[in-house]
Image: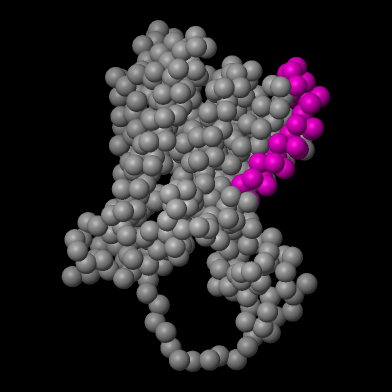
Amino acid sequence: MRPLFRSDSWYLVAFFLVLISIGSVLLVLPVAQASQDRTVRPVSFIDALFMATSAVCVTGLATVDLGRFSSFGQTVILLLIQFGGLGIISFTSLLLILPGGRIPFRRLSTIRSFYVDGVEYDPRKILLNIISATLCIEALGAVILSLLFKKAGVADYLFNGIFHAVSAFCNAGLSPFADSLERFSGNAAILTVVILLIILGGLGFIVLQDVFDVIKGKHRYLNYHSRVVLLMTAALIGIGFLFYFFMEKSAAFARLSINDRIMNALFQAVTPRTAGFDTVPQALLSQPSKVFTIILMFIGAAPGSIAGGIKITTFFVVIVMMTRNPDPLGDVQIGKHRISSYTMNRATVYLLKAVSLLLISALLLSLIEGPRGVAFDEIVFEVVSAFGTVGLSLGLTPHLSIAGKLVIIGIMFAGRVGLIALSFSVVRLKKYEITYPEGQVLLG
C-alpha cells in the first residue's frame, strides 16, 4: 500500500494546518473573548485565524491586542506558541518513532538533515533532549521573569512570567502587554533575561547539545557547525549593537540615559533575529536603522532552532562563496575546513527561494495596500518580518485589509513551514548513468 504522503514535508504542513485550524476555532469562541461593552465588536474569524497563524508560526505580528482575549484565549495562544515552536524540529523526530522499531531510510535521512556529525541523532534521544531542554530553560526563565514582574508591580505576574518566557524562548514576540516591552525599556534585569531566552532559542538544539556535551567533558571541542553559529551570532549581535547605539542616540534613544541606551541598543540588536519584542516603537527608528533591521530579520538565527529567516549558516556560506574562490572540485577552503560544493549549492538555492518569496509577497501586498496609501517601506518591513517570523512592525499590521491579512498569513506560513518543506525531497529521483554535454551560459 502506498503511503498517503510521499514526503515528510506533507506531514509537516498538515501538522501546522491542523494546529492553526484548531487554534482559530478556539480563539473565535465567546469564552476566548474578553468581557467588553457592546461598543467593541468581538474578535472576527479572520483576526482569530491571523493570531493563530502568528502564534503557531511563532511570528508575533498581531492584528488585535492580546487584551481582547480572555485568560482562556491567552492560554490558547500560549499553547499554540509552545506547540508551534517545538513543531518544526520535534515533529520530524516524532515521525521516526511512530512506526516502531524499523526506521525507513527516507525518514532517517530527513532527521539527519537537522543534525550534524558528532551530535546525537537517535530519534528517541533527540525528542527527549528537545522537550527536556525546552521545558527546563522556559521554566527557569518563567521563575525569574515572574519575580522581576512582581517587583515591577505587574498584575498577574505569574502568568505574564510564564507567557513571556515561552514567547521569548520560542522567538514568538507576542506579549499580553499592549506596548510589548516598551514599559520596561529602563528595566535592565527584565531585558537581560528576555535577551538570554531569545538567544538560547535561536541557537538551535544542535548547538545547545554540543555545548552541553563539551561542558560535561564528552568531547573536547565544539563541532564546526556550532562554532560557525556561535561566531556568527556574536558578530551580528556585536555589529547590531554598535550600529543601533550610534545611529539612534539622537533618534529613538534620544531620551534614554547612557545605561538605558546601551541596554536598548543590545535588545534591538537581538530582537530582529527573530524575536519580535520591542522596547521602542520601530516607527521611531531612523531610516538606516529600519533598513538594517530588515537585513537582520532576513538573516534570522540558526538552523534547527525555533527562529526563522534564511539562517545565519546560509548567510555565512553565501559570504564565503562571495569572498573565496572554489577549488577544481567546486569546494571552498576556509581555515582548516572545507565547504563542499553541495552545501554551497543548497545555500544558493535556499537563498533564491527566499528572495523570490519576498519579491512576490511584496508585490502582492503592494497591489492590495498600495492604493490605500500605505508607504512602500512599511510594506517591505511587514513582508520581511512575516517571512522571517519576527513580529516587528512599523504599525501596519492592525490596519491591514482582509486581503492584506490573508497575504501576511500566507507569508508567515511559508516563512515558517514552506522553505523547510521545500528543502525536503518530495519524490525519489531515479539516477541514470548518462552524461549530457555541457551547456555554456555567459555570466556577468
Front in this rendered view, residue 325 or 439: 325
The N terminus lies in quadrant: bottom left
Task: Give the quadrant of residue 23.
Answer: top left
Q: Is residue 127 left or right of residue 318?
A: left
Task: Give the quadrant of residue 293.
Answer: top right
Front in this rendered view, residue 180 or 62: 180
The answer to whether 404 is drawn above or below residue 210 in the figure is above
In the image, what residue occupies the spot 46% across and 23% down? Answer: 144
- The residue range painted magenta reads 232-258
The C terminus lies in quadrant: bottom right
Front in this rendered view, residue 3 or 95: 95
Q: Is residue 373 visible?
A: no
Q: Position of residue 146 (x, y in %)?
A: 44, 19
Q: Position of residue 175 (x, y in %)?
A: 48, 25
Coloration mode: one colour
Q: Position of residue 155 (x, y in %)?
A: 44, 10
The answer to whether 183 is drawn above or below residue 163 in the figure is above
In the image, what residue occupies the spot 34% across and 42% down? Answer: 132
In the image, what residue occupies the spot 45% across and 17% down? Answer: 147
Q: Position of residue 45 (x, y in %)?
A: 38, 30
In the image, what residue occupies the spot 38% across and 58% down? Answer: 120
The answer to whether 117 is drawn above or below residue 297 in the figure is below
Q: Is residue 330 visible?
A: yes
- The total number of labels drawn is 0
- Characterize the magenta stretch by its predominant secondary structure: helix
The answer to whether 8 is drawn above or below residue 202 in the figure is below
Magenta span contains residue 417: no
